[in-house]
Amino acid sequence: MKTLYIFLTRSGTLVSNLVYALTGAEYTHISLAFDEDLTTLYSSTRKNGYTMFPAGPSREYLNRGVFRLRENIPCALYALEVTDEAYARAKRRADHMMNHGELNSVGLLLCALHIRWNRRRHYFCSQFVSEVLQKSGSLDLPRHSTLMRPNDYAAMPQLRCLYSGRLAGLPQRQSMEMGEVESVVELYLDVMLGAVKTSARRFF
């Protein structure tokens, strides 16, 4: 048997606040990890960790981006025991979606209104995690992945809560080196450089 880790947060970003206003949910974002140290989190979110765009399936880190800047946000960490085979399928599925997926922004808004919107290879955070878990055989969901919300996972009996509180108190984050916060200019230069590289790859 192996363990998958489901990480719930409410970051206070513009999108997070919008979802919170529409749903009133304690948690508005969900990520998935494959190791106990939470070295890398998988989700569909900000690609550089700081700015709203670009966005889509990407890796998150507890000592970078929004998680680096907002240590007092509420969070919860859950463990899900799965077979070795389901764990391997989940990891392959997550990696595939990382390489071929895009952001499902329309689906995110419609999910808050209980309206199903499925677009091939497009995901918002809870849809991303839900599809990885469901299609790997790790977890049976109570509803379609496009209607799953982060807060739904806090009430699932199959998950075991390991931590609930402020991000600053999460043991995995406390053990990490925080480093220095990048300046706003550096952040936007990185975003522009990434956009130029993407355009160049598409052109050639």
Image (cartoon, helix red, strand yellow):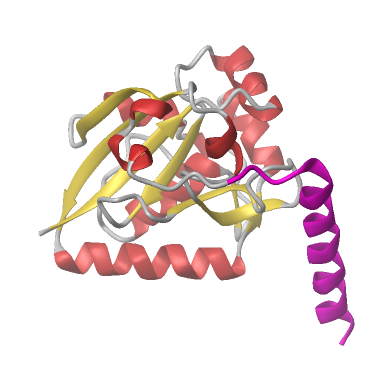
Residue 121 in sight here: yes
Residue located 53% across and 37% down the image = 67
Q: Which quadrant of the rendered structure holds the C terminus?
A: bottom right
Q: Which residues are magenta?
A: 180-204
- The image shows residue 14 at horizontal and vertical percentages of 71, 26
- The image shows residue 123 at horizontal and vertical percentages of 58, 50
Residue located 76% across and 47% down the image = 53
Quadrant of the rendered image containing residue 142: top left
Residue located 59% across and 37% down the image = 66
Q: Nearer the viewer, residue 156 or 78?
A: 78
Q: Is residue 73 above or below residue 61?
A: above
Q: Is residue 121 above or below residue 140?
A: below
Left or right relative to 134: residue 72? right
Q: Nearer the viewer, residue 106 or 25?
A: 25
Which residue lies most toward the front here? 180
- The image shows residue 128 at horizontal and vertical percentages of 49, 50
Q: Which quadrant of the rendered structure holds the N terminus?
A: bottom left
- The image shows residue 46 at horizontal and vertical percentages of 65, 46
Q: Is residue 85 above or below residue 125?
A: below
Residue 113 in sight here: no
Q: Nearer the viewer, residue 199 or 68?
A: 68
Quadrant of the rendered image containing residue 132: bottom left
Which residue lies most toward the bottom here? 204
Magenta stretch encompasses residue 192: yes
Magenta stretch encompasses residue 150: no
Magenta span dominant secondary structure: helix
Residue located 80% across and 71% down the image = 198
